[in-house]
Amino acid sequence: MAAKLRELWNHPAGPKTVFFWAPTVKWGISIANIADMQRPTEQISYPQQLAITATGIIWSRYSTQITPVNYNLLAVNAFMAVTGMYQLYRKTMAEQAKKAVA
């Protein structure tokens, strides 16, 4: 077990590098976006959710092209893209429902 931990510790994208900590901290944005799913759709911002979605898509691609491939970065950005797209879907559907009622 100690050898596996040492391997993780010394990995080029391990805890001694920014390549580990930046995506780890970025999970906070994804968690906040999940918390926002309880928020009324009137309070969802198109620009914010477009930025979250675009960031997720762009950096997901980037994380597969760098050496070493950073799976933590890939996971957090894929998750950001999905949550952003879902929030955009919620906002769009709510606005269409309002227009249908009016």
Image (spheres, grey):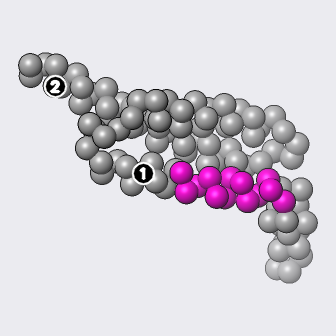
| Point 81% across, 44% down: residue | 69
Q: Quadrant of residue 43?
A: top left
The residue lying furthest to the left in this view is: 102
| Residue where numbered disc 1 is placed | 34
The answer to whether residue 60 is above or below residue 11 is above
Q: Is residue 24 magenta?
A: yes
Amino acid type assigned to the residue bearing label 1 in the image: Ile
| Point 9% across, 22% down: residue | 101
Give the crowd class for mark 1: few <14, some 14-19, many >=20 residues within 10 Å. Answer: some
Amino acid type assigned to the residue bearing label 2 in the image: Lys
The answer to whether residue 17 is above or below residue 61 is below
The answer to whether residue 34 is above or below residue 42 is below
| Point 81% across, 34% down: residue | 65
Q: Give the magenta-colored segment's residue range.
A: 17-29
Q: Main secondary structure of the magenta part?
A: helix
| Residue where numbered disc 2 is placed | 98
Q: How many marks?
A: 2
Q: Quadrant of the N terminus?
A: bottom right
- Lateral position of residue 59 relative to residue 44, left or right: right
In front here: 62 or 29? 29
Give the crowd class for mark 2: few <14, some 14-19, many >=20 residues within 10 Å. Answer: few
Expressed as whole percent of the image width and height from the top left, the position of residue 98 reads 16, 25
Q: Earlier in the sequence, mark 1 or mark 2?
A: 1
Q: Is residue 6 magenta?
A: no
